[in-house]
Amino acid sequence: MDNEIDWGNLPFGYVPTDCNVRCTFRDGKWGPVEVSHSETINIHMAATALHYGQELFEGLKAFRGADGKIRIFRLEENAKRIRESAKGILMEPIPEDLFREMCIKAVKLNERFVPPYGSGASLYIRPLEIGLSPRIGVKEADEYLFIVMVTPVGPYFKGGFKNTNICIMREYDRVAPRGTGRWKIGGNYAASLASGKKAHDLGYSAVLFLDPKEKKYLDECGPANFYAIKDGKYITPKSDSILPSITNLSLQEFAKEMGMEVECRHITVDELEDVSEAGACGTAAVCSPIGEIDDLDTGHKYIISRDGKPGPVTTEFVRRLEAIRHGEEPDTHGWNTIIE
């Protein structure tokens, strides 16, 4: 199988692997960890996952390093975030040690699908939890299934590390002001599909959403967090409706190490005039530089990159991120989990 994979031209899509790892919460406790070779789930037609949106997931990656070792990046942060998502929609939180055990097991059992060092590809780890209990009345489940599946992936944005253009459109909201935006649940992504398709049809890589209450401040950038460099500072939107990105947290650490101030705050649309660099960051997007932001409602174009190339700060962010994740530089923050 691995000989058939063209590692250098992998899409960001699903590639079958050898197995996945599963665990069921039933009768008030998590059961044994099981290995499954099935790509399907058998659930009741009235399961809360299907009717009331009790479904959540995470995304993290494993990399094969220059030394041949496999590293999972910032596993502990994903373990914390998935628990917050579960609490947010009344699902059973996954114990951190169980999350860790199952992610490591899924990577080890599918080790031959971890792309080789230097290929630009990675092993994407997708943990997901669903409500199993049949409900017709609106109520949370008392049985849950937690699965960790993996698949090798190439870059999220086709063409790799180069500028993309994004757009602002006010006719869509991604989430409600005090809604589910801070949790990684399927409903948020369903709400972004129509605007995302419209943006792609117009030639943009993503929508830069505005805050759902006042439409004054920048929010999420498609499926990723937005950041910018302004007056030598790293600025990123702060809001209860934004999913806290683990990649964004990492970039903030890099910015501080590079001597930059970090501001997590409301950012108005007109501030884009004074931005020297901008990007979309997340596990899938990594750190994708933005060349231009077009406001489709006003017709105004914010030219971020004057020369059409990624800026120096974003370029350095990506270099540092890749170096740490591939074991090329010391992991001074202890972000990597090395698979023994």
Image (cartoon, grey):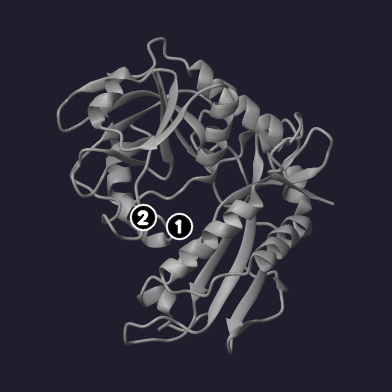
With 135 as the anchor, is 104 left or right in this view?
right
Q: Residue 95 in the image: state x and y as whole percent.
A: 63, 69
- How far apart are the alpha carbons under marks 1 and 2? 7 Å
How far across and how far down the image is residue 63, in percent?
71, 42
Q: Which SS class for mark 1?
A: loop
Residue at x 31%, y 18% (from the top left corner): 274
Residue at the spot of label 2: 181
- Residue bearing the label numbered 1: 184
Disc 2 residue crowd, few under 14, some 14–19, many 20+, Cα 10 Å: many
Q: Is residue 103 above or below residue 165?
A: below
The foreground one among 220 and 190 is 220
In this rendering, position of residue 211 left or right of residue 28? left
Q: Residues within 10 Å of mark 1 (few under 14, many from 20)?
A: many
Q: Is residue 240 visible?
A: yes
Q: Camera-side residue: 193 or 288?
A: 288
Point 48% across, 31% down: residue? 288
Picture residue at 75% right of the left edge, 29% below the top: 329
Q: Indicate the secondary structure of the residue bearing disc 2.
A: loop
Q: State which quadrant residue 110 falls in.
A: bottom right
Examine the rendering and report whether any part of residue 126 can be seen.
no
Instruction: Tell me the quarter of the picture where residue 99 sits.
Output: bottom right
Residue 21 in the image: x percent, y percent?
68, 67
Q: Residue at x 49, y 23 (%)?
A: 162
Q: Amino acid at mark 2?
A: Gly
